[in-house]
Amino acid sequence: MIAKTIKGKTTVEIQQALGQCSEHHFSPTLAIIFLTNIENAEPLRSLFNKEGITIFGISTSQKFTEQGLEEDDIVVLLLDILPDNFQIVLSDYDKACSVYDAARQVGEVGVQDFKNPGFIISSADFRMSGEELIKGLTDAAGKETVIMGGVAGDPADFSGIIFTNDASSTRGILALVIDQDKVAINGLAVSGWKPVGTTKKITKSEGPWIFTIDNEPALNVIQRFLGKEVAADYKMSGLIPSDLGYPLQFERASGSILMRPLLLFNPAEKSIMVGGDVNEGESFRFSLPPDFDAIDTVVNSTITVKEDTMPDADAMIVFSCIGRLGSFGPMISTEIEGLAATWKKPMIGIFSLGEFGKLDEHRCEFHGTTVSWVALKERN
């Protein structure tokens, strides 16, 4: 399988780049499209439809390729993967169809088309339950199903779209379903943040909202660690900025750490909202601000997979939490360069509003402040 990244400020520039590809006898069948200006989605759909290329499209505030952070509005990873080896599914959810039901429909399509499907996914609504999405997919396709991806959208107002050739959605699930018997998928969800402080317990919660920690108002506990200025500075909006760099670390029974970033707080109820559902009785620790060790952890995870199971890859797709961009600042380029250097093949990535992926060899979960990366390799 051959892969190539192209980019442009407009659809016209993307059309010109596609023309140059055909001059080099490269005939892609699949386009992974990441864009910032949502208005570009419709003309891109028209362009790729005329070219007979299938679309997996996501809007995002920031994106990157193997060449680093990209300022152009549109970046595209082109693949000449055999059409029989993949399927695109877009499933909307609303009051009549829950996130779970929509995800289950996606999973059912996957197992109907392929004996061993793998899923690269995105959703366009950061308020949806990532846990319910995963449950729906795995109930249909199996608990050990490979699921990697990230949530589309702009953190400024949480707006975003997902789109393919004949449809787009602001409340749906988009999946690139791949036949793993024909194309190998390998990836992990990795954070690298170091824990600090004593273990604390969630004593009252509902969904992603935490009301008490160790039987104390949750906001009081957070302020004691982060400082009272958190509530003071953002009292009007109730928004905790995504670049604080202090996500909560929840330890699973397996020993793996699940990251939950702080998103919102309610001063009246003294509650906090984190990036994902939490259960009463779960324990967590705070995180230290990230350093180069966090970057090394992410990059080393790709090197380990390369050395152990996937010596070569055809392409790489990365979903990195938008909180990492705010926390690392210019250092994020080091992480991008490290990821690109492992296989030295075309790579495309976004900064997402939540990530899907497996921790070590365990089942997929929904994460925050994490890098969910996936490498693809066509089987001989």
Image (spheres, grey):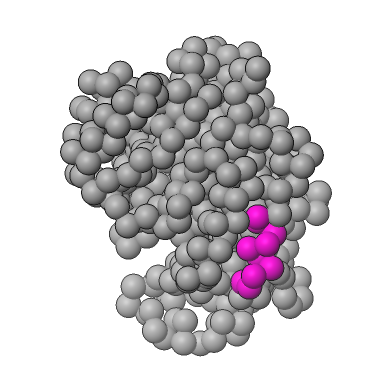
- Rendered view: 50 above or below 225: above
| Residue 265 shows in the view | no
Residue 363 in percent (x, y) is at 70, 38
Quarter containing the C terminus: top right
Q: How many marks?
A: 0
The foreground one among 311 and 185 is: 311
- Rendered view: 240 above or below 259: below
Q: Which residue is located at x 54 percent, y 36 percent?
A: 315
Residue 150 in percent (x, y) is at 49, 45
Residue 312 in percent (x, y) is at 66, 34
| Residue 145 shows in the view | yes
Q: Which residue is located at x 71 percent, y 54 percent?
A: 300
Residue 197 sits in which quadrant?
A: bottom right
Q: Which residue is located at x 66 percent, y 65 percent?
A: 294
Residue 77 in percent (x, y) is at 42, 37
Q: Is residue 283 left or right of residue 80?
A: right
Q: Is residue 237 left or right of residue 141?
A: left
Residue 85 lies within the magenta run: no
Q: Residue farthest to the front?
A: 24
Q: Main secondary structure of the magenta part?
A: helix
- Rendered view: 10 above or below 311: below
Q: Which residue is located at x 41 percent, y 40 percent?
A: 5
Bounds of the magenta segment: 290-299
Residue 365 sits in which quadrant?
A: top right
Residue 298 lies within the magenta run: yes
The foreground one among 123 and 179 is: 179
